[in-house]
Image (cartoon, grey):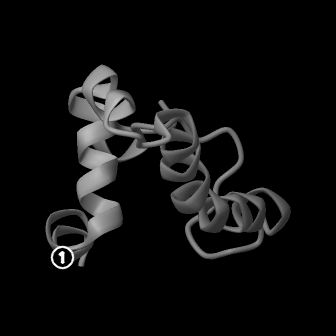
Amino acid sequence: MSYLILGRTRIGLRLRFCGENPVTAESLGVAVVSHKYVAVVVPGAPAGPGGAALVFDPGQPGYLEGRPGAAGTSAWPR
């Protein structure tokens, strides 16, 4: 899906152009700063409620208090 958006649409082309060569994009009239903000805010908006759900619902399956991030790679607790 992201291939289709970034590779086949006008906004995707502008986003890629702002990241690869922002000086040239700005000289062609593309609002580089606003495109960069959109590129950060739009994917981050759905991630916020997902992170909040992880924080505020500790009773979900597989949740263990004090569990390190790489618990699946080592024996825990020792």
Q: How many marks?
A: 1
Residue 59: quadrant of the picture = bottom right
Looking at the picture, tell me which residue is in the foreground, 6 or 61: 6
Residue at (31%, 37%) from the top-left corner? 28
Q: Is residue 8 above or below residue 28?
A: below
Q: Is residue 11 left or right of residue 78?
A: left
Is residue 4 shown above or below 69?
below
66 or 28, which is in the foreground? Answer: 28
Task: Name, please, the residue furthest toward the front.
Answer: 28
In the image, is residue 13 above or below residue 57?
A: above
Residue that extends furthest to the top in the rendered view of this protein: 23
**Residue at (56, 52) in percent of width and height:** 38
Q: Position of residue 43 (x, y in %)?
A: 52, 60
Residue in view at x 21 percent, y 30 percent: 20
Side of 50 relative to 16 (left or right): right
| In this picture, residue 51 sits left or right of residue 12 | right
Instruction: Please state which amino acid type lies under the numbered disc 1.
Output: Leu
Quarter of the rendering containing residue 51: bottom right
Horizontally, is 50 left or right of 40 in the view?
right
Q: Nearer the viewer, residue 41 or 55?
A: 41
Viewer-side residue, 48 vs 14: 14
Report the residue at 60% width, 61% height from top: 47
67 above or below 1?
above
**Label 1, on which residue?**
4
Residue 1: x and y in percent read 24, 79
Q: Residues within 10 Å of mark 1 (few under 14, many from 20)?
A: few
In terms of secondary structure, where does tag 1 sit?
helix
